[in-house]
Amino acid sequence: MSKKNKEEKIKAKAKEETINTDAADVETAVQEEITAEEKLQEDLAKEKDKFLRLFAEFENFKKRTSKERIELFKTANQDVVLAMLPVLDDFDRALNEISKSESGELFKGVELINNKFKETLKNKGLEDVEVNQGDVFDADIHEAITQIPAPSDDLKGKIIDVIEKGYKLGEKIIRYPKVVVGQ
């Protein structure tokens, strides 16, 4: 083999090695880019998940605070209404006593004031807790003052008498009805 052929073979081999090295470098670079892209995809998925969780948490916060605000508005005047309940009871007792007298005009006047007072409290959300004689006693919505022997077997465990009316403001009972229960 001539020197020229040897040189050409060496050059061709060097060129081939350079091509192989370049190809390996390109393949390594492609692998690195794929790995970097996969890492970016993972990071993006993590951030997206974090965003969705944060968004859901914020939505829950908005709902909770809105619900608390509505509840606050419903019961904001609870202290005032509670303070007025004894006055309402006194009005009812006064009406009961005036109705026994023969003064019809006095009864009508006090009844008008009583009705206006009740209507005003009703507009503020006050409602009676319905309790009737013979209803089954429920400790969740009634307050038993005393127990007496039931006049008949069918009144055992039932309400014999209502001593004091109960009231609720919205859905919340602010004063439980005081009752006498048959034993």
Image: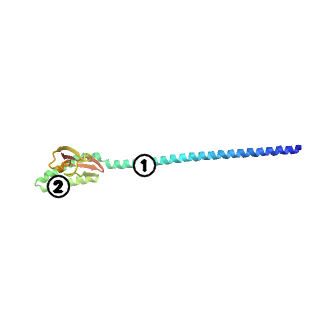
Say whether residue 162 is visible: no
* First along the sequence among labels 1 and 2: 1
Secondary element type, mark 2: helix
Three-letter residue code for mark 1: Lys
**Three-letter amino acid code at disc 2?**
Gly
Q: Residue at x 53, y 48 (%)?
A: 48
Evaluate whether residue 62 shows in this view: yes
Q: Residues within 10 Å of mark 1 (few under 14, many from 20)?
A: few
Q: Is residue 2 left or right of residue 161?
A: right
Mark 2 lies on residue: 109
Residue 76 spot, x, y in % from top left? 32, 47
Query: In the image, which is nearer the foreground, mark 1 or mark 2?
Result: 1
Horizontally, residue 103 falls left or right of residue 144, namely left
In the displayed structure image, the side of residue 98 where residue 34 appears, left or right: right
The residue beneath circle 1 is 62
- Percent coordinates x, y for residue 112 in the rendering: 19, 55
Pick the front one: 3 or 63: 3
